[in-house]
Amino acid sequence: MNHKSGFSMALAAVSLCASGAFAACSPAPDCGTVVDVQTVKTEGQSSGGGAVLGGIVGGVIGHQVGSGRGNTVATVAGAAGGAYAGNQIEKNKNSTTTYVVKLKMDNGASRTFNFSQPTSFQIGDKIKVVDKKLTKQ
């Protein structure tokens, strides 16, 4: 093959790619690669109900200890400890865990998908987005 015909073939191939005749030449907007997978835990909010309930229970339990001044100290300490514990329990109950999968699309765009359950996606996986859902290629 001479240089002239090799150049003509290369020019024809570039023309076909530019026209979109070959799908591999143009980046697919729905295909990409997983670049990051994270587990994000968000601490829950407290309404105060857990602290109030914990304070009451702690105070009642503390009141069962000792007599006289020791009983008063135990009641106050039980109420304070119960309020703190009740508040923490409520916050833990209301916490959420989100599993975040970040993609670098073939067309250069970045996309992020959040899941409420753990996923099997790993960094480097080839992904296709179908109906706003991820599928491995």
Image (spheres, rainbow, N blue to C red):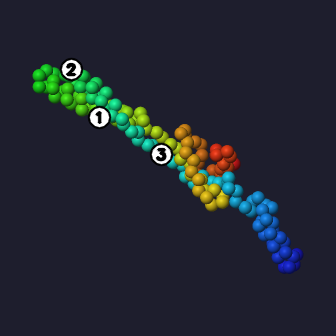
Q: What residue is rendered at 82% in x and 76% in y? A: 7
Residue 18 horizontal/vertical position (percent): 77, 67
Instruction: Tell me the kind of residue under disc 3.
Output: Val
Please tell me which residue is depicted at 68% across the width and 46% down the height of the picture: 130
Quadrant for the N terminus in the image? bottom right
Name which quarter of the figure residue 80 lies in: top left
User: Residue at label 1?
Assistant: 84
Residue that mark 3 sits on: 40
> In 3D space, how far apart are the residues under numbered discs 2 and 1 (Cα atoms)?
19 Å
Which residue was labeled with disc 2? Answer: 64
Q: Residue furthest left?
A: 68
Q: Residues within 10 Å of mark 1 (few under 14, many from 20)?
A: some
User: What x and y, as percent, mark residue 112?
Assistant: 57, 51
Q: Which quadrant would residue 84 be assigned to in this image? A: top left
Tags 1 and 3 touching, CB below 8 Å = no
- For residue 62, which quarter of the picture? top left
Of mark 2 and mark 3, the one earlier in the sequence is 3
Picture coordinates of residue 41, whole percent (x, y):
45, 43
Asked whether residue 85 is in view, the answer is no
Mark before the other along the chain sequence, 2 or 1: 2
Q: Earlier in the sequence, mark 1 or mark 3?
A: 3
Determine the residue positioned at 13% across, 25% down.
70
